[in-house]
């Protein structure tokens, strides 16, 4: 921490608190008035005109007080209300206010009657609070303000700060024009536009620095703070049109998030990923070795889907990049589509519908069968396959499954010992194997020939699993009676033209990889994956990471947390602990998880420690990544 000869001048409304106190007072005093909304809007308008410097502050104050019709007795409840409305990052950084108490001032055009009791809890005594005071009549009604006070006048903060004659560098932290002008008048050295509660363009454009929270201000000044690295500095890039709730969840937690609609080709992603800490993708974006090498700040990749083979998981792990996915969120959506498609195919609905669309009435029962009593063969009895078996049995199908792993049969489902057995017995075969590249062309000419004549094939897993040319041939020759295909060996990165050999073949349902694309699934993924990402960034928890040693820990309390990712080589833990011991750190807890190549150790230490230990830990041989959390 650097020694400072600085004075910190805070604004109150919308800076120390999330609100404008007079707006809150208005809500209280006008609560029973029929024209409450109208008056509150007027007050807010007048407040903003004053803050942006569009009318004189005195005028704004006079007009608002007249509209307020407040009483002395309203001030106690107002203070209680304001206590609940302290800005989040201010409340989280009490330590700064305690340690630098002598250097902190409040200059506000608000009123001491409600500011003093609030900031007192942050060790700012009344004599360091510069603000207006109310005038009351004999009945205690608020009828005005002390007009002699410079803060009741236009640009009053300039006069106030000048009179204070502070020594050292003066930094002003506030959200509005009246704060900025202190810097413009040459009395303050720096102006930080505080945008945690409101982003005022005019103030931000004039600022030396825009601080989206107090952590950023403290980070820039190297002052004691709640977060070692402010969250707004953590950049998240979300590709492929992930649900907007993901943006909302991550932004609400303070991260800086950028949304891109499409997936990006490798060269573009290599450029775009520089400086990005978290990359969010769906199934199209290829996260290759080159992309991972270009990700100089990359900590996490979030796959907003189930499949993760589009990511080089092994290389990511070796680079200390954790990968999370959403293994369950869209499974029900896939299952429902499969059920719908089984019925559609068995009834030749697509052909009948196309006939009517082209003006033909072709009522016929030929090629139209009930699913009840038919054999459904599920290949891949995982999260999707199992759910599908339950629903298929519920509509009267006899369900068979084949899986390379031993799986418990649900309901009356029958296990097949080989793929061939399943193909021989099924009227409909549906593929739900995982996205392992070993499954390439898993269903080709030979397997198709093992299917019953006239059987149907559904693929909602991955495009490369089926040899499309062989399937097209089998459909054209009449070997197969129909198919529903959602996934293709080559899929375009964005919406537009598309070609497949299956186009134009009767009784073939073609969908553009939308098996998991329902509003419900995407909404659920937008909660699930960001939660995993936030947990990893905020606490170091790696539980459910698909490529990474798993550790689950509670948020550290009153401790610093060191996160050390290293190559899993003999003696590395001894070296880490040697470093910790040489800096005489008091270890509150240490948790290690390893796999064959990578180790992940989390160490919680006392709050006070020699910062050089960080450099020493980063220098330990075979360190992959190191982070500090507090
Ligand atoms: N179309 C879409 O929009 C969506 C597609 N998917 C895809 O669906 C597939 C299944 O997803 P989940 O059920 O969640 O996966 P899962 O991992 O829970 O289940 C896959 C099952 O397939 C088995 N398996 C793998 N290779 C096999 C083989 N060659 N023969 C027999 N069994 C094999 C595995 O042992 C496992 O039990 C994945 O490929 C996933 O990417 C998932 C969601 C949406
Ligand atoms: O909707 C997506 O982005 C891909 C869905 C999918 O295939 C998966 O979850 O694995």
Image (cartoon, rainbow, N blue to C red):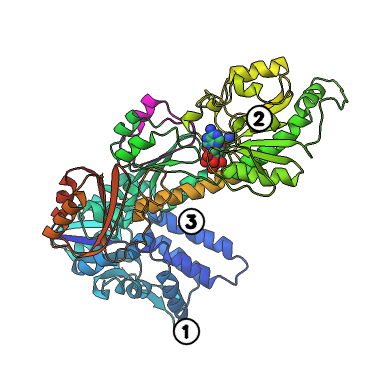
**Mark 2 vs mark 3: which is more N-terminal?**
3
481 vs 511, left or right, is right
Q: Which residue is mark 1?
A: 139
Mark 2, secondary structure of its residue: helix
Q: Residue 316: give x, y in percent of width and height.
A: 34, 37
Q: CA distance from mark 2 to mark 3?
A: 72 Å
Q: Residue at x 41, y 47 (%)?
A: 545
Q: Residue 178: give x, y in percent of width and height.
A: 32, 56
**Mark 2 vs mark 1: which is more N-terminal?**
1
Asked whether residue 275 is drawn in magenta, I would say: yes
Image quadrant of residue 607?
Answer: bottom left
Which one is in front in this view, the residue at disc 2 or the one at disc 1? 2
Which one is in front in this view, the residue at disc 3 or the one at disc 1? 3
Asked whether residue 14 is drawn in magenta, I would say: no
Q: Residue at x 61, y 41 (%)?
A: 385
Badge 2 crowding class, 10 Å Cα cut-off, few under 14, some 14 to 19, many 20 or more, is: many
Q: Which residue is mark 2?
A: 423
Q: CA distance from mark 2 to mark 1?
A: 91 Å
Mark 3, secondary structure of its residue: helix
Q: CA distance from mark 3 to mark 1?
A: 29 Å
Q: Which residue is mark 3?
A: 45
Judging depth in this view, the residue of 427 and 346 nearest the camera is: 427
Residue at the extreme front of the image, as rendered: 417
Which one is in front in this view, the residue at disc 2 or the one at disc 3? 2
**Mark 3 vs mark 1: which is more N-terminal?**
3
Question: In the image, which residues are magenta?
Answer: 263-286
Judging depth in this view, the residue of 333 and 100 nearest the camera is: 333
Q: Residue at x 42, y 70 (%)?
A: 82
């Amino acid at each position: 921490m650097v020694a400072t000869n600085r004075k910190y001048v805070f604004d109150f409304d919308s800076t120390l608190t999330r609100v404008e106190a007079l707006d809150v007072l208005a809500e209280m005093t006008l609560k029973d008035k029929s024209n409450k909304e109208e008056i509150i809007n007027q007050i807010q308008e007048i407040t903003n005109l004053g803050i942006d410097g569009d009318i004189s502050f005195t005028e704004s104050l006079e007009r608002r007080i007249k509209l307020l019709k407040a009483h002395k007795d309203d001030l106690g409840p107002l203070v209680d209300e304001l206590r609940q409305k302290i800005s989040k990052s201010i409340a989280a950084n009490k330590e700064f206010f305690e340690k630098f108490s002598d250097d902190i001032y409040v200059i506000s055009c608000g009123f001491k009657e409600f500011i003093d009791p609030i900031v007192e809890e942050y060790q700012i005594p009344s004599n360091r609070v510069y603000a207006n005071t109310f005038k009351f009549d004999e009945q205690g009604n608020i009828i005005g303000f002390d007009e002699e006070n410079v803060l009741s006048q236009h640009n009053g903060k300039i006069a106030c700060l000048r009179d204070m004659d502070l020594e050292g560098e003066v930094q002003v932290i506030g959200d509005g024009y009246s704060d900025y002008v202190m810097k413009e008048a040459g009395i303050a050295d720096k102006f930080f536009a505080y945008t945690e509660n409101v982003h005022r363009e005019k103030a931000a454009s004039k600022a030396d620095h825009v601080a989206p929270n107090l952590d950023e201000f403290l980070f820039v000044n190297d002052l004691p703070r709640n977060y070692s690295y402010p969250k707004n500095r953590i950049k998240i890039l979300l590709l492929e049109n992930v649900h907007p709730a993901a943006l909302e969840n991550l932004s609400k937690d303070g991260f800086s998030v950028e949304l891109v609609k499409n997936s990006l080709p490798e060269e573009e992603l290599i450029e775009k990923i520089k400086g990005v800490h978290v990359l969010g993708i769906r199934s199209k974006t290829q996260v290759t070795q080159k992309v991972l090498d270009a990700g100089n700040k990359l900590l996490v990749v979030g796959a907003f889907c189930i499949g993760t083979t589009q990511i080089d998981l092994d290389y990511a792990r070796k680079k200390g990049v954790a990968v999370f996915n959403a293994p369950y969120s869209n499974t029900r959506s896939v299952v429902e589509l499969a059920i719908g498609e089984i019925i559609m195919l068995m009834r030749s609905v697509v052909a009948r519908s196309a006939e009517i669309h082209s003006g033909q009435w072709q009522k016929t029962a030929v090629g139209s069968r009930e699913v009840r009593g038919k054999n459904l063969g599920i290949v891949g009895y995982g999260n999707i396959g199992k759910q599908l078996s339950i629903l298929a049995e519920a509509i009267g199908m006899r369900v068979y499954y084949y899986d390379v792993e031993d799986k418990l049969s649900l309901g009356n489902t029958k296990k097949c010992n080989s793929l061939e057995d399943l193909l021989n017995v099924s009227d409909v075969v549906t593929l739900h194997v995982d996205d392992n590249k070993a499954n390439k062309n898993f269903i080709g000419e030979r397997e198709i020939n093992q299917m019953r004549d006239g059987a149907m094939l559904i693929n909602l897993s991955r495009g490369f699993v089926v040899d499309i040319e062989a399937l097209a041939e089998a459909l054209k020759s009449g070997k197969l009676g129909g198919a529903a295909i959602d996934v293709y060996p080559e899929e375009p990165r964005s919406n537009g033209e598309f070609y497949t050999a299956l186009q134009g073949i009767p009784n073939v349902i073609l969908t553009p990889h939308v098996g998991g694309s329902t509003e419900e699934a995407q909404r659920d993924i937008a909660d699930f994956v960001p939660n995993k990402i936030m947990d990893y960034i905020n606490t170091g928890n790696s539980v459910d990471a698909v490529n990474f040693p798993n550790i689950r820990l509670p948020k550290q309390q009153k401790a610093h947390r060191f996160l050390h990712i290293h190559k899993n080589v003999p003696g590395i833990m001894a070296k880490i602990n040697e470093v910790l011991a040489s800096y005489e750190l008091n270890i509150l807890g240490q948790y290690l998880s390893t796999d064959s190549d990578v180790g992940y150790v989390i160490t919680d230490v006392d709050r006070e420690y020699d910062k050089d230990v960080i450099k020493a830990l980063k220098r330990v041989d075979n360190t992959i990544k190191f982070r500090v959390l507090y």
